[in-house]
Amino acid sequence: MTTTPILQVNTLDPRAAVPEYHSEEASGLDLAACLPRGDCAASVLSIEPGQIVKIPTGLSLAIPTGHEGQVRPRSGLATRRGLTVVNAPGTIDADYRGEVFVALINLGSRPVRIEHGDRVAQLVISPVTRAAVMVVGTLDSTGRGAGGFGSTGVGQGSESEVSR
C-alpha cells in the first residue's frame, strides 16, 4: 500500500496563499505571489522584458524525505504573457527550510504586472532516486556515442531541412 506524502507548509506571512491543487487530477499545486504590504504600488510588481525577478511566496515548506519540490511554469502565463520560471524546473530540496521564491523571467515583448495573490508557478512533489557515484576509466559504448545536442534528429526531416 502506498502512502500519500505529507507536505508541511509554514505561512511566514498571514496573507500568503497555501498551495492547493485546482482540479481533481492536477499534478501541480499552485504557488502565489506574496508581495510586500504597503501602498497599492507595493502590492504590484512589473517585470520588464528580459528581466528576472524573485517572487516571494510567504511560505516555507518541509518536503517529505525522499522527495523534491519541482517549481514549474504555469502554461497560461508562459503562452499568454511570456513569463516562465528561469531555472525550470527549479528544485526545492527536502532539507531546505527557508522562504520559497519563484524566479520568473519575462520572455515577452511587454512588461507584465504581478499582483499580490497571483498564481505564478506550480509545485510538483516528486520522488527522488539518489545514485551511487562510481569513477571509472572508460564507459561502455552506445550507438549514439558522444553525439550531443540534436544528434538524434529533430523530427521527420534532418536538422538542415528543419532550419531552412
Image (tube, helix red, strand yellow):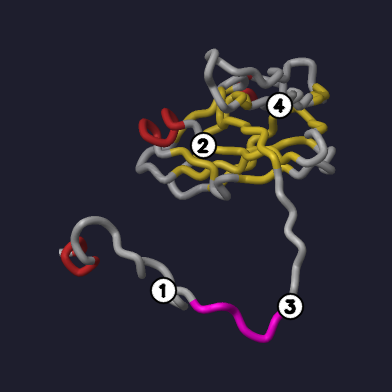
Magenta segment main secondary structure: loop
Structural distance between the alpha carbons of marks 4 and 2? 22 Å
Q: What type is the residue that disc 1 sits on?
A: Gly
At a point 49% along the width and 31% down the height, the residue shown is 74
Q: Position of residue 141 (x, y in %)?
A: 51, 78
| Residue matched to label 4 | 36
At a point 63% along the width and 32% down the height, the residue shown is 123
Structural distance between the alpha carbons of marks 1 and 3? 22 Å
| Residue matched to label 3 | 135
Structural distance between the alpha carbons of marks 1 and 4? 54 Å
Structural distance between the alpha carbons of marks 4 and 3? 48 Å
Q: Nearer the viewer, residue 7 or 104?
A: 7
| Residue matched to label 1 | 143
| Residue matched to label 2 | 73
Q: What type is the residue that disc 4 sits on?
A: Pro
Q: Position of residue 8 (x, y in %)?
A: 81, 25
Q: Position of residue 139 (x, y in %)?
A: 59, 79
Instruction: Choose the circle earlier in sequence order: 2 or 1.
Output: 2
The mark lying in front, picked from 2 and 1, is 1
Structural distance between the alpha carbons of marks 2 and 3? 36 Å
The mark lying in front, picked from 1 and 3, is 1
The mark lying in front, picked from 2 and 3, is 3
Q: Decide if residue 82 is on the left or right side of residue 116.
A: left
| Magenta stretch in the rendered image | 135-141
Disc number at residue 119?
A: none
Q: Decide if residue 55 is on the left or right side of residue 9.
A: left
What element does badge 2 sit on?
loop
What element does badge 1 sit on?
loop
What element does badge 3 sit on?
loop
